[in-house]
Amino acid sequence: MATAATALPFPLADDLLQTTLAVSLTAINLLRPVLGPAEDLLDFTLEYINPAGQRMTGLPERPAGTLGTLFPHAYSTGLLDFYRRVFATSQPGTFDFTYESDEADSFYLVAAQRSGDLLVVSLTNSAQQERPAVEQALRASQTREQAARQAAERERNLLESILEQAPVAIGLFRGPEQEVATANTQLCAMWGHEPAEVLGRPLLEGVPELQGQGFAELIGEVARTQVPYVGREVPAQLAQQGRLQTCYFNFVYQPLYGPGGELLGVLDIAIDVTEQVLARQQVQHLNEELAATNEELQAANEEFLANNEELTRTQLQLQQLNEELERRVTERTRALAQAQAEAEHQRQRLTRFFNQAPAAICMLDGPDFVFELVNPTYQQLFPGRQLLGRPLLAALPEISGQPVWHTLQHVYETGQTHEEVGIRTPIATYEGGPLKDFYLHYIQQARYDEHGRIDGVLVFALDMTEQVLAQQRADALQAEMLATAQRRAQEREDLFNVYERTPAVIAFLRGPEHRLAYFNPAYEQLFPGRQMRGRPIADIQPEAVEQGFVQLLDHVYQTGETYYGNELPLKVVQPDSDQAKTTYFNFTYQAYQEDGQPAGISVFAYDVTEQVLARQQRAAQQQQLRELFEQAPVAIAVFRGPQYIIELANPAMGRLWGRTPEQSLQVPLFELLPEASGQGFEELLNTVLATGEPHVAHELPSLIDRAGRRETMYMNFVYQPLRNADGQTTGVTVVATEVSEQVAARHQVQALNEELRAANQELQATNSQLLRTNADLDNFIYTASHDLKAPITNIEGLLTALQEQLPDQLREHEQVHPLLDMMHGAIERFQKTIAHLTDISKLQQAHEQAEELVDLAGLLRDVQLDLAPELAVAHAQLLVDVSAHPTLSFSPKNLRSIFYNLLSNAIKYRAPGRAPRIELRCMPGPGQVVLEVQDNGLGLDAAQQSQLFGMFQRLHSHVEGSGIGLYMVKKIVENAGGTITVRSEPNVGSTFRIVLPV
């Protein structure tokens, strides 16, 4: 059933725009911005949704809530940001996005433009249309993006495997207790403990052997200073194979930061170099043994030289000591043989050591460094090259210009021993072969002849190529692992931030007990004040057990089937009361696995309470609308087609027609009411049906057959065209109200008005007569006062002349003087009475004076100046407070007269024995203003108060006065439409209250 046009939140020049919005197949929305405290644009309310938009969204024409609450995906898709940008820049724009739902996903094209304080939005949904090429391209892009995300996930899993299987030890320590947050298998094996013994525990508690070795202090220093620490070949006592052993490690303690720059912990990357250190120590031991052997050999040479010298001295004495010489020669020959045998033994021993030493040893002779000796280990470095007997540069020409060549020359020239550790030396292992990088640890030591001159260089070398390359690979792997760990930590932190900031409810449950492992702030807000982390859902939320949610969780965990809940109610008992709050959610329970086994359930939900309540409210409103239609005090009916078939008629319309609903429905109108033919109704309906223009009629007379007799009725009604979805007029809606009683009453009122008009004319004539009488009275008073002035003035002049003519003795006579004073007093009182009569005659003229906006404070200052002498003599205190109503529209002269009379009376009639205190206040009231003058004077009893405002009434004889002042105040107030009253108590004071209309 079509109804009257819905009032839109903007004016229409005609119904064309309204009709266009109604028949448009495109969704049209009008959005109004929602601003924050800092005038920042937060969201939009939906001021209007046309029928196509209502069908698309399932929302009413003016839904409650904001865009963000009704469509949460407006944040993730960027739609809300697009609306903000268009509204802020006033530049029209278009936007497209894809919304994925359970049923299908749809591609939306949006156009928006600002219009004044509103944003006009047009939306097109491609769900029911052939997908355009751009959408197909977009979907292909989304498919590629999803594949890329899966590849990234596989890569993250691969990185986790690499981290676990890395040949280096990796761990992460958090907090002041240095809790072991991460430790891969290599690090646990290095410590000699299982992962369960160390993970989640402080380092020194999980690995107590490290107590007192300084590692915990180093980690604490890195966390405090955030400066990395690099340790090389650092010894550590660790439990290895059931006993403490000394191991050596190269390690890095690196601070690890979060995205906001906060310290997450200290990263440990370590490599076991125990074998390299022990090997180097063995080489050092062999070098020391070789040096000792050299010292022994040198001693033997020195002894041999000494023996030669002694032999020379013996030969010089040969002639003199021949026999002794022969004996001694024999002895010396025997000793020499023994020494030679010993020297040969030492030489053989040295040769065995030289050949068996694990280090590369060679002897270079002379300044050309000829290879004099080369042990097998040295020769193995160059298996394809001839070394013995050849100069160094002839055998190994590639070392020319290298550091090893320069250091040899320096040792030969200076005799200073030179050592290098891990120096790179490119050398070819075969003649003409490619250069190969050797990393050598060598010692170059000068050799001396029997005269102490350098005649060669002894070289001890250890090939460290494999160790150095391994170290380089370890360093590169360490850097790669560090970067990977940092990247993964950043990814996890980014994901964590998304979870923390999303308005949706997210939680992760672990195990068959559904223990709450993680929950975001939106989840926590559902259960305020509850301790939840690590506890089973059944313990945290007993409501979930009662409402069957735990049973659902058990089913999802056991079967792996995802559960989708739509608009399910959740009742949560609030901490501040025993009442349960009901919230409606769309949610998903989805199982996840670890190592192929069920591990837990992920919970994703979003609040749809507003939508559910809005739909319930809409249903209630529809029910109310139906009840309103049935119970409406006006008659409503719907006619369809050119025959005006009665499609709908409420009971009020049935009573108007005098027919029951069963008699009325699905019957042509003029068949049901044949008496309505010929009264012009059919022509009106035809015009509305043809033109589509509504028709309004007031108090239209109609003849209707009711209860077997024809009655004349008067009705107000509206004929409203009823249109289909194509905008074609297919029927007419009529809303009618019977006004027969009102018409009859109006006719009666018109008759009464005629009678009243005649009475008013009589009253007007009476008023005119009264006005003339009042005018004559005013003229009489004015004339009397004016005409009496001359006689009294003459009497006063004659009395003065008489007084001047009387002799002084007679004038001062005891009987004459009082008579003269009494005559003067009578004349003075008569003059005052004439003056007061003049003032009374002027009251009517004063009433006709124009009103002005009077500044009360300024007017009262002038009155106070006029009364200053009286105030000073009486030592009176005058308090004025007109701040609540500082101005008043009144005749300034009349208002001054009111204030002057009231204040002067308060001074005159003050109480003896206390200083006068007078308060004047002005206060606003509903449609009026109140003036109060309060004093602490003599006061009045009830009888005096009843006579107070009469003309020439004087209630106190000890003060001069005429009794006309308060009478004039009362007349001025009443002429202005106000009232004046008094509250008084003898010997306490009086309060005069004036109420004036505003």
Image (tube, rainbow, N blue to C red):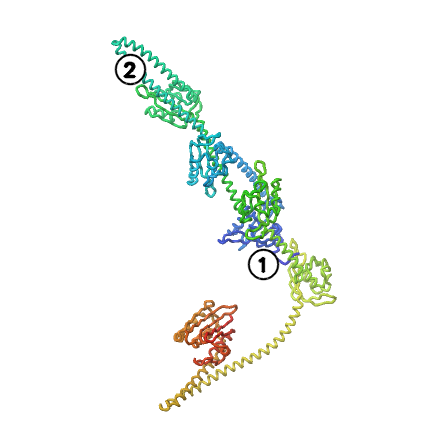
Rendered location of residue 727, percent (x, y): 64, 55
Q: Residues within 10 Å of mark 1 (few under 14, many from 20)?
A: few
Q: Is residue 162 visible?
A: no
Residue that protrudes farthest toward the top in the picture: 323
Inspect the image, locate mark 1, and give the three-letter code of the amino acid beneath it.
Ala
Residue 882, compared with residue 285, is above or below; it is below
Rendered location of residue 87, percent (x, y): 52, 52
Residue 709: image tag: none
Q: Nearest the camera: 301 or 448?
A: 301
Residue that protrudes farthest toward the front in the picture: 243
Q: Residues within 10 Å of mark 2 (few under 14, many from 20)?
A: few
Q: Which residue is mark 2?
A: 309
Residue at 39%, 75% in the rendered image: 873
Q: Nearer the viewer, mark 2 or mark 1?
A: 2
Residue that protrudes farthest toward the right in the picture: 708
Inspect the image, locate mark 2, and give the three-letter code of the amino acid beneath it.
Glu
Rendered location of residue 730, percent (x, y): 67, 56
Residue 241, compared with residue 567, is above or below; it is above
Is disc 2 placed on a helix, strand or loop? helix
Q: Quadrant of residue 637?
A: bottom right
Rendered location of residue 487, percent (x, y): 49, 38
Residue 13: image tag: 1
